[in-house]
Image (cartoon, rainbow, N blue to C red):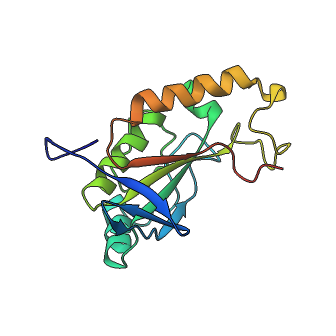
C-alpha cells in the first residue's frame, strides 16, 4: 500500500521474464548516485554551486526517476547538525544528518523521484574499508550497524519514495 496525497493506493508489484511490473506496467528505473554525505557529516556534493531544486529539476527534466543517497553509519549514529560548507546554497543549514535525507526525500517525492539509501562507508574516513558491512575497528559491530539501519528506517521509511537500501557499497 502507498499513500499519495492522503489517499491509499494499492500497488501490485511483481517480476516476470526478467522485468519488474507495477500494476501491470513495466517499471524502468533510471537513476544516479549523489555522492558527498558519505565522506563527512554534511550534505551531498554540489550544494555550494547549485540548490537541491536545481539538481532535482535537472533529473526530472531528463527523465531520471531514482536517486541513490549515500551515507556513513558513524554520522547516522551521531546525528549531529550537518557540517555545512560556508557557501551552502540550500536549506540544509542547522538540520541534523538524518533530517537532511528526509528533506531530500520530500523534494524528490514532489518530482516523482524514488530514493535508495546507500551505506557507502562505516565512517567518513573508512575507505575503502575491509569490504564488510560492519567493522569493529571503527566501533561498528553487526549489532551497531543494525541499530544505525533501524534509526534510518524509523526516520525515513514513512516517505513513499524511499524504496530501497544498499547494505554496503562494493562488498568483497
Residue 39, percent across and down? Answer: 65, 47
Residue found at x 52% / y 44%: 42
Residue 142: % across, % down? 73, 25
Q: Foreground: 111 or 46? A: 111
With 155 as the anchor, is 131 left or right in this view? right
Residue 123 location (% of width, % of height): 70, 37
Does 168 sit above or below residue 147? Answer: below
Instruction: Tell whether 82 sits left or right of 36.
Output: left
Tell me: 62 left or right of 46.
Answer: left
| Residue lying furthest left | 6
User: As displayed, is residue 95 above or below residue 140?
Assistant: below
Residue 86 image offset from top left, x and y in percent: 46, 50
Give the image quarter of residue 156: top left
Q: Is residue 133 above or below residue 139?
A: below
Q: Is residue 81 visible?
A: no
Say how many tags the image has: 0
Residue drawn at the location 57% of the way across and 25% of the way down? 78
What residue is shown at x 52% (from left), y 40% (from top)? 83
The quadrant of the picture occupied by the N terminus is top left
Q: Quadrant of residue 121?
A: top right
Which residue: 32% across, 65% down?
A: 24
Q: Is residue 158 visible?
A: yes
Where 26 falls versus 171 (above or below)? below
Task: Spot the residue most to the front.
Answer: 17
Task: Determine the residue located farthest toward the bottom in the rendered image.
Answer: 62
In the rendered structure, the answer to whether residue 163 lies left or right of residue 18 reads left
Amino acid at each position: 500500500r502507498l499513500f499519495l496525497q492522503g489517499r491509499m493506493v494499492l500497488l501490485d508489484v511483481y517480476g516476470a521474464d526478467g522485468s519488474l511490473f507495477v500494476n501491470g506496467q513495466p517499471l524502468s528505473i533510471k537513476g544516479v548516485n549523489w555522492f558527498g554525505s558519505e565522506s563527512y557529516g554534511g550534505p551531498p556534493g554540489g550544494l555550494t554551486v547549485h540548490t537541491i531544486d536545481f539538481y532535482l529539476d535537472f533529473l526530472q527534466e531528463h527523465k531520471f526517476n531514482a536517486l541513490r543517497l549515500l551515507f556513513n553509519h558513524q554520522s547516522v549514529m551521531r546525528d549531529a547538525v550537518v557540517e555545512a560548507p560556508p557557501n551552502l546554497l540550500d536549506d540544509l543549514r542547522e538540520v541534523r544528518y538524518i533530517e537532511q535525507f528526509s528533506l531530500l526525500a520530500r523534494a524528490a517525492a514532489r518530482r516523482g523521484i524514488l530514493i535508495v539509501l546507500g551505506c557507502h562507508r562505516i565512517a567518513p574516513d573508512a575507505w575503502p574499508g575491509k569490504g564488510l558491512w560492519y567493522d569493529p575497528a571503527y566501533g561498528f559491530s553487526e549489532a551497531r550497524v543494525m541499530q544505525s539501519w533501524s534509526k534510518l528506517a524509523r526516520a525515513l521509511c514513512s516517505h513513499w519514495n524511499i524504496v530501497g537500501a544498499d547494505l554496503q557499497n562494493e562488498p568483497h
